[in-house]
Image (tube, rainbow, N blue to C red):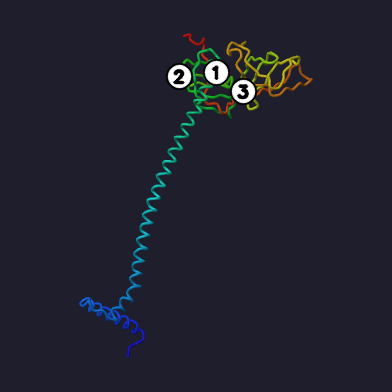
Protein backbone atom coordinates (compact mmCIF):
# COMPACT_ATOMS: atom_id res chain seq x y z
CA UNK A 1 0.00 0.00 0.00
CA UNK A 2 1.39 3.38 -1.06
CA UNK A 3 -0.02 6.73 0.10
CA UNK A 4 -1.82 8.70 -2.61
CA UNK A 5 0.53 11.68 -2.37
CA UNK A 6 3.49 9.50 -3.36
CA UNK A 7 1.80 7.62 -6.17
CA UNK A 8 2.43 10.32 -8.79
CA UNK A 9 6.07 10.65 -7.81
CA UNK A 10 6.59 6.89 -7.92
CA UNK A 11 4.84 6.64 -11.28
CA UNK A 12 6.91 9.38 -12.86
CA UNK A 13 10.10 7.88 -11.40
CA UNK A 14 9.23 4.47 -12.78
CA UNK A 15 8.55 5.91 -16.23
CA UNK A 16 11.85 7.77 -16.22
CA UNK A 17 13.76 4.65 -15.13
CA UNK A 18 12.04 2.59 -17.81
CA UNK A 19 12.78 5.20 -20.48
CA UNK A 20 16.43 5.38 -19.45
CA UNK A 21 16.72 1.64 -19.48
CA UNK A 22 15.20 1.38 -22.93
CA UNK A 23 17.40 4.15 -24.30
CA UNK A 24 20.48 2.48 -22.80
CA UNK A 25 19.52 -0.79 -24.39
CA UNK A 26 18.94 0.84 -27.74
CA UNK A 27 22.18 2.71 -27.57
CA UNK A 28 24.04 -0.54 -26.99
CA UNK A 29 22.09 -2.21 -29.78
CA UNK A 30 21.08 0.59 -32.17
CA UNK A 31 20.35 -1.80 -35.01
CA UNK A 32 17.39 -3.22 -33.13
CA UNK A 33 14.15 -1.38 -32.99
CA UNK A 34 11.09 -2.12 -31.03
CA UNK A 35 7.85 -0.88 -29.71
CA UNK A 36 9.32 0.69 -26.63
CA UNK A 37 11.91 2.59 -28.65
CA UNK A 38 9.22 4.06 -30.86
CA UNK A 39 7.13 4.86 -27.82
CA UNK A 40 10.00 6.76 -26.22
CA UNK A 41 10.76 8.64 -29.39
CA UNK A 42 7.11 9.64 -29.78
CA UNK A 43 6.98 10.79 -26.18
CA UNK A 44 10.25 12.74 -26.49
CA UNK A 45 9.31 14.57 -29.73
CA UNK A 46 6.87 17.10 -28.15
CA UNK A 47 9.35 17.74 -25.37
CA UNK A 48 12.11 18.36 -27.90
CA UNK A 49 9.87 20.65 -29.90
CA UNK A 50 9.04 22.61 -26.74
CA UNK A 51 12.71 22.92 -25.82
CA UNK A 52 13.60 24.04 -29.35
CA UNK A 53 10.74 26.58 -29.35
CA UNK A 54 11.89 27.97 -26.01
CA UNK A 55 15.48 28.26 -27.19
CA UNK A 56 14.36 29.92 -30.44
CA UNK A 57 12.12 32.30 -28.48
CA UNK A 58 14.94 33.27 -26.16
CA UNK A 59 17.27 33.75 -29.14
CA UNK A 60 14.72 35.97 -30.93
CA UNK A 61 14.10 37.96 -27.76
CA UNK A 62 17.81 38.51 -27.30
CA UNK A 63 18.23 39.62 -30.92
CA UNK A 64 15.29 42.03 -30.52
CA UNK A 65 16.81 43.40 -27.33
CA UNK A 66 20.18 43.98 -29.04
CA UNK A 67 18.34 45.60 -31.98
CA UNK A 68 16.39 47.92 -29.67
CA UNK A 69 19.55 48.90 -27.81
CA UNK A 70 21.21 49.75 -31.12
CA UNK A 71 18.12 51.61 -32.30
CA UNK A 72 18.01 53.65 -29.11
CA UNK A 73 21.66 54.60 -29.53
CA UNK A 74 21.06 55.51 -33.18
CA UNK A 75 18.09 57.67 -32.18
CA UNK A 76 20.24 59.44 -29.62
CA UNK A 77 22.91 60.17 -32.24
CA UNK A 78 20.27 61.41 -34.70
CA UNK A 79 18.73 63.70 -32.07
CA UNK A 80 22.16 65.17 -31.30
CA UNK A 81 22.80 65.68 -35.02
CA UNK A 82 19.40 67.35 -35.52
CA UNK A 83 20.04 69.65 -32.56
CA UNK A 84 23.48 70.58 -33.91
CA UNK A 85 22.15 71.21 -37.42
CA UNK A 86 19.27 73.28 -36.01
CA UNK A 87 21.72 75.48 -34.11
CA UNK A 88 23.85 75.90 -37.23
CA UNK A 89 20.75 76.79 -39.25
CA UNK A 90 19.78 79.42 -36.67
CA UNK A 91 23.30 80.90 -36.79
CA UNK A 92 23.30 80.96 -40.59
CA UNK A 93 19.85 82.56 -40.64
CA UNK A 94 20.94 85.19 -38.12
CA UNK A 95 24.00 85.90 -40.25
CA UNK A 96 21.82 86.19 -43.35
CA UNK A 97 19.39 88.58 -41.64
CA UNK A 98 22.26 90.63 -40.25
CA UNK A 99 23.73 90.83 -43.74
CA UNK A 100 20.44 92.20 -45.06
CA UNK A 101 20.31 94.84 -42.32
CA UNK A 102 23.93 95.86 -42.89
CA UNK A 103 23.31 96.13 -46.63
CA UNK A 104 20.46 98.54 -45.92
CA UNK A 105 22.75 100.53 -43.62
CA UNK A 106 25.35 100.64 -46.39
CA UNK A 107 22.74 102.02 -48.78
CA UNK A 108 21.83 104.61 -46.15
CA UNK A 109 25.52 105.48 -45.74
CA UNK A 110 25.89 106.07 -49.48
CA UNK A 111 22.97 108.51 -49.38
CA UNK A 112 24.41 110.48 -46.45
CA UNK A 113 27.85 111.20 -48.01
CA UNK A 114 29.36 111.65 -44.55
CA UNK A 115 31.88 109.63 -42.64
CA UNK A 116 30.04 107.15 -40.47
CA UNK A 117 30.73 104.38 -38.00
CA UNK A 118 28.53 101.31 -37.67
CA UNK A 119 27.46 100.36 -34.15
CA UNK A 120 25.44 97.62 -32.51
CA UNK A 121 22.71 98.28 -29.98
CA UNK A 122 23.82 96.55 -26.79
CA UNK A 123 21.27 97.86 -24.31
CA UNK A 124 17.92 99.60 -24.21
CA UNK A 125 15.58 100.51 -21.38
CA UNK A 126 12.15 101.42 -22.74
CA UNK A 127 10.69 101.72 -19.25
CA UNK A 128 13.13 104.41 -18.11
CA UNK A 129 12.25 108.08 -17.76
CA UNK A 130 14.70 109.01 -20.52
CA UNK A 131 14.29 107.06 -23.76
CA UNK A 132 17.83 106.04 -24.60
CA UNK A 133 19.84 103.13 -25.92
CA UNK A 134 23.48 102.11 -25.63
CA UNK A 135 25.76 101.33 -28.58
CA UNK A 136 29.14 99.58 -28.69
CA UNK A 137 31.14 102.48 -30.14
CA UNK A 138 32.79 105.35 -28.27
CA UNK A 139 35.46 108.00 -28.42
CA UNK A 140 38.04 105.45 -29.56
CA UNK A 141 36.07 105.16 -32.82
CA UNK A 142 35.53 108.92 -33.18
CA UNK A 143 32.10 109.09 -31.54
CA UNK A 144 31.40 112.19 -29.46
CA UNK A 145 28.39 113.88 -27.88
CA UNK A 146 25.94 115.67 -30.16
CA UNK A 147 26.50 113.44 -33.21
CA UNK A 148 23.41 112.19 -35.09
CA UNK A 149 22.49 108.52 -35.08
CA UNK A 150 20.45 106.96 -37.90
CA UNK A 151 19.27 103.58 -39.10
CA UNK A 152 18.21 102.44 -42.54
CA UNK A 153 14.65 103.49 -41.57
CA UNK A 154 15.42 107.05 -40.52
CA UNK A 155 16.63 109.26 -37.69
CA UNK A 156 17.20 107.52 -34.35
CA UNK A 157 18.49 110.36 -32.15
CA UNK A 158 21.78 111.87 -31.05
CA UNK A 159 24.71 110.89 -28.84
CA UNK A 160 24.44 112.43 -25.36
CA UNK A 161 27.14 110.51 -23.49
CA UNK A 162 30.26 108.64 -24.54
CA UNK A 163 33.17 106.66 -23.11
CA UNK A 164 36.09 104.90 -24.80
CA UNK A 165 34.04 102.06 -26.31
CA UNK A 166 30.39 102.73 -25.39
CA UNK A 167 27.98 105.60 -26.03
CA UNK A 168 24.44 106.51 -24.98
CA UNK A 169 21.94 107.78 -27.56
CA UNK A 170 18.93 109.97 -26.77
CA UNK A 171 16.00 108.81 -28.93
CA UNK A 172 13.78 111.24 -30.80
CA UNK A 173 10.78 109.96 -28.84
CA UNK A 174 12.25 111.18 -25.55
CA UNK A 175 10.27 114.13 -24.17
CA UNK A 176 13.43 116.22 -23.83
CA UNK A 177 14.22 115.79 -27.53
CA UNK A 178 13.45 118.79 -29.77
CA UNK A 179 14.38 118.85 -33.48
CA UNK A 180 13.85 121.43 -36.23
CA UNK A 181 11.86 119.73 -38.97
CA UNK A 182 9.94 120.23 -42.20
CA UNK A 183 6.66 118.72 -43.32
CA UNK A 184 7.76 117.61 -46.73
CA UNK A 185 4.47 118.16 -48.55
CA UNK A 186 3.64 121.71 -47.40
CA UNK A 187 7.24 122.70 -46.44
CA UNK A 188 5.85 123.88 -43.11
CA UNK A 189 8.55 124.33 -40.50
CA UNK A 190 8.01 123.06 -36.97
CA UNK A 191 9.63 121.68 -33.85
CA UNK A 192 9.39 117.91 -33.34
CA UNK A 193 9.14 116.93 -29.68
CA UNK A 194 9.25 113.40 -28.30
CA UNK A 195 6.13 112.04 -26.68
CA UNK A 196 7.37 108.73 -25.31
CA UNK A 197 5.27 105.71 -26.22
CA UNK A 198 2.94 107.97 -28.22
CA UNK A 199 5.74 108.76 -30.67
CA UNK A 200 6.29 112.45 -31.42
CA UNK A 201 4.30 115.66 -31.81
CA UNK A 202 4.76 118.67 -34.09
CA UNK A 203 4.71 122.03 -32.37
CA UNK A 204 4.13 125.52 -33.76
CA UNK A 205 2.56 124.56 -37.10
CA UNK A 206 0.20 127.47 -37.99
CA UNK A 207 -3.34 126.59 -38.98
CA UNK A 208 -2.84 128.32 -42.31
CA UNK A 209 -0.45 125.49 -43.24
CA UNK A 210 -1.98 122.57 -45.13
CA UNK A 211 -0.83 119.39 -43.47
CA UNK A 212 -2.26 115.96 -44.25
CA UNK A 213 -2.02 112.55 -42.62
CA UNK A 214 0.73 110.54 -44.25
CA UNK A 215 2.96 113.53 -45.06
CA UNK A 216 6.66 112.72 -44.46
CA UNK A 217 8.46 114.70 -41.75
CA UNK A 218 12.18 115.36 -42.34
CA UNK A 219 14.97 117.27 -40.64
CA UNK A 220 15.25 120.90 -41.75
CA UNK A 221 19.01 121.23 -41.22
CA UNK A 222 18.60 124.52 -39.32
CA UNK A 223 19.99 123.36 -36.00
CA UNK A 224 23.38 122.42 -37.38
CA UNK A 225 23.19 119.02 -35.66
CA UNK A 226 21.18 117.07 -38.22
CA UNK A 227 21.65 117.37 -41.95
CA UNK A 228 18.65 118.38 -43.99
CA UNK A 229 16.44 115.64 -45.39
CA UNK A 230 16.79 112.85 -42.81
CA UNK A 231 13.49 111.02 -42.52
CA UNK A 232 11.90 111.19 -39.07
CA UNK A 233 8.43 109.81 -39.63
CA UNK A 234 4.99 110.54 -41.06
CA UNK A 235 2.05 112.62 -39.91
CA UNK A 236 -0.32 110.36 -38.00
CA UNK A 237 -3.19 112.66 -37.03
CA UNK A 238 -4.10 116.35 -37.03
CA UNK A 239 -6.26 118.13 -34.47
CA UNK A 240 -7.61 121.33 -36.04
CA UNK A 241 -9.18 122.77 -32.88
CA UNK A 242 -10.54 126.31 -32.86
CA UNK A 243 -9.01 127.33 -29.54
CA UNK A 244 -5.42 127.49 -30.72
CA UNK A 245 -3.41 129.21 -33.43
CA UNK A 246 -1.48 126.02 -34.17
CA UNK A 247 -2.31 122.52 -35.31
CA UNK A 248 -1.88 119.69 -32.87
CA UNK A 249 -0.12 117.06 -34.95
CA UNK A 250 0.98 113.57 -33.99
CA UNK A 251 3.87 111.92 -35.83
CA UNK A 252 4.65 108.21 -36.13
CA UNK A 253 8.44 107.65 -36.10
CA UNK A 254 9.88 105.80 -39.08
CA UNK A 255 12.19 103.78 -36.83
CA UNK A 256 10.94 100.78 -34.87
CA UNK A 257 13.02 101.35 -31.74
CA UNK A 258 11.98 98.06 -30.12
CA UNK A 259 13.61 96.08 -32.95
CA UNK A 260 16.63 98.27 -33.59
CA UNK A 261 19.89 96.25 -33.71
CA UNK A 262 22.42 98.24 -35.76
CA UNK A 263 22.81 101.98 -36.33
CA UNK A 264 25.08 104.48 -38.07
CA UNK A 265 26.73 107.33 -36.16
CA UNK A 266 27.31 110.25 -38.53
CA UNK A 267 30.79 111.66 -37.95
CA UNK A 268 31.91 115.23 -38.77
CA UNK A 269 33.27 115.82 -42.26
CA UNK A 270 32.42 114.53 -45.69
CA UNK A 271 33.24 111.03 -46.94
CA UNK A 272 36.88 110.85 -48.02
CA UNK A 273 37.97 113.71 -45.75
CA UNK A 274 40.25 113.11 -42.77
Residue located beneath label 3 in the image: 254
Residue 119 position in % (x across, y down): 49, 21
Q: Residue 237: which numbered mark, if any?
A: none
Tell me: 47 left or right of 198: left
Residue located beneath label 1 in the image: 108
Residue 220 in sight from this viewpoint: yes
Q: Quadrant of the N terminus?
A: bottom left
| Front-most of residues 58 and 243 | 58
Residue located beneath label 2 in the image: 164
- Crowd band around label 2 with a 10 angstrom C-alpha radius: few (<14), some (14–19), many (20+): some
**How far apart are the two marked residues, 3 and 2, measured between alpha carbons?**
30 Å
Which residue ends up furthest to the top in the rendered image?
Answer: 273
Q: Quadrant of residue 20?
A: bottom left
Q: Secondary structure at mark 1?
A: helix
Whichever of callouts 3 and 2 sits on the residue coming sooner in the sequence is 2
The residue depicted at 41 percent of the width and 41 percent of the height is: 81
User: Comparing marks 1 and 3, which lies closer to the viewer?
Assistant: 1
Tell how many labels. 3
Whichever of callouts 2 and 1 sits on the residue coming sooner in the sequence is 1
**How far apart are the two marked residues, 2 and 1, measured between alpha carbons?**
26 Å
Amino acid sequence: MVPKRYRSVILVTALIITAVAILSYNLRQPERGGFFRMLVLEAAAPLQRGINASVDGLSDAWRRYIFLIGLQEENRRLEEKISRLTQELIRYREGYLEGLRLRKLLEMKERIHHRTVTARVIDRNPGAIFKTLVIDRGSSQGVRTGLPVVSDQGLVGKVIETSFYVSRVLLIIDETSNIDVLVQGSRAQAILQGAGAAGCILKYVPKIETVQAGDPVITSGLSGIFDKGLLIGTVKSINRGESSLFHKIEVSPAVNFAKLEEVLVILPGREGMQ
